[in-house]
Amino acid sequence: MSALPRRMKTNQRWRQLGLLALLLLLLAMTRAALAWDRGWYVSINWTESLPFWAFVVDKRAEPQVGDYIDFWPPENPYYDDIAFVKQVVAGPGDLITCDGRRFFFEGREIALAKEVSQAGDILHLGPCGVVPDGHYFVLTPHKDSFDSRYQEIGYVPRDRVRGVARPLF
């Protein structure tokens, strides 16, 4: 038997193994893409309210105090059809107290509500008291953040939360 047919068979085996490896890689990538599509997406923060502008959002994670969440705000006069990313500072059963326009959680001041918006509109104070079941009190540290300290946002119901947002950039 000559060396040529043996070399051809060896090359053919390597080609078959290469095709099999490529097929397995494509299958794995397809599964990963489908899993990503079902459970994850990227969200962009279009305002200066957070130091981060891009987030990976896990649609299956349950929000906890300290997490960032991506959610649909209620209809309001300032933002139309744009999701918000804010930090959960209090969850169901937690107590938010107020003194004038100052908001407190566990005895420490967490936010000061402005009287007027950047556009000069009067801003109405958000809720104080025990956060209801299935709701979150959300903030960002920015002085102009439009969040739970204002009535137009208030407590965020769980059914408006799209997922837990993890900062990328």
Image: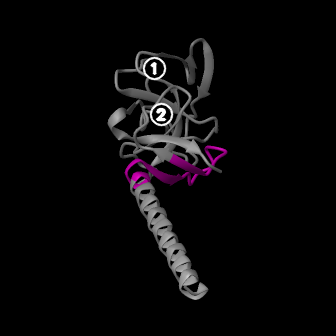
Depicted 110 relative to depicted 139: above or below:
above
Magenta-colored stretch includes residue 44: yes
**Foreground pick, 45 / 107:** 45
* Numbered disc 2: secondary structure: loop
The circle drawn on residue 116 is: none
The residue that disc 1 covers is 128
Amino acid identity at mark 2: Tyr
Residue 94 placement (x, y as % from top left)? 46, 16
Asked if the residue under mark 1 is in contact with the one under mark 2, i.e. CB atoms within 8 Å, the reply is no
* Numbered disc 1: secondary structure: loop
Residue 37 placement (x, y as % from top left)? 40, 55
Quarter of the image where the N terminus is located: bottom right
**Foreground pick, 91 / 129:** 91
Q: Which residues are magenta?
A: 35-56
Depicted 45 relative to depicted 155: above or below:
below
Could you tell me how far apart the alpha carbons at marks 2 and 1 are, in whole angstroms?
10 Å
Residue 67 picture quarter:
top right
**Foreground pick, 11 / 39:** 11
Query: Can I make out residue 113 in this image?
Result: yes
Q: Which residue does the image show at 64% across and 39% down from the upper left?
A: 142
Label 2, residues with CA under 10 Å away: few <14, some 14-19, many ≥20: some
Residue 147 placement (x, y as % from top left)? 50, 37
The residue that disc 2 covers is 150
Residue 84 placement (x, y as % from top left)? 48, 46
Q: Which residue does the image show at 55% across and 76% down from the upper left?
A: 10
Q: Residue furthest front?
A: 1
Q: Which residue does the image show at 36% across and 40% down from the upper left?
A: 160
Magenta-colored stretch includes residue 4: no
Q: Earlier in the sequence, mark 2 or mark 1?
A: 1
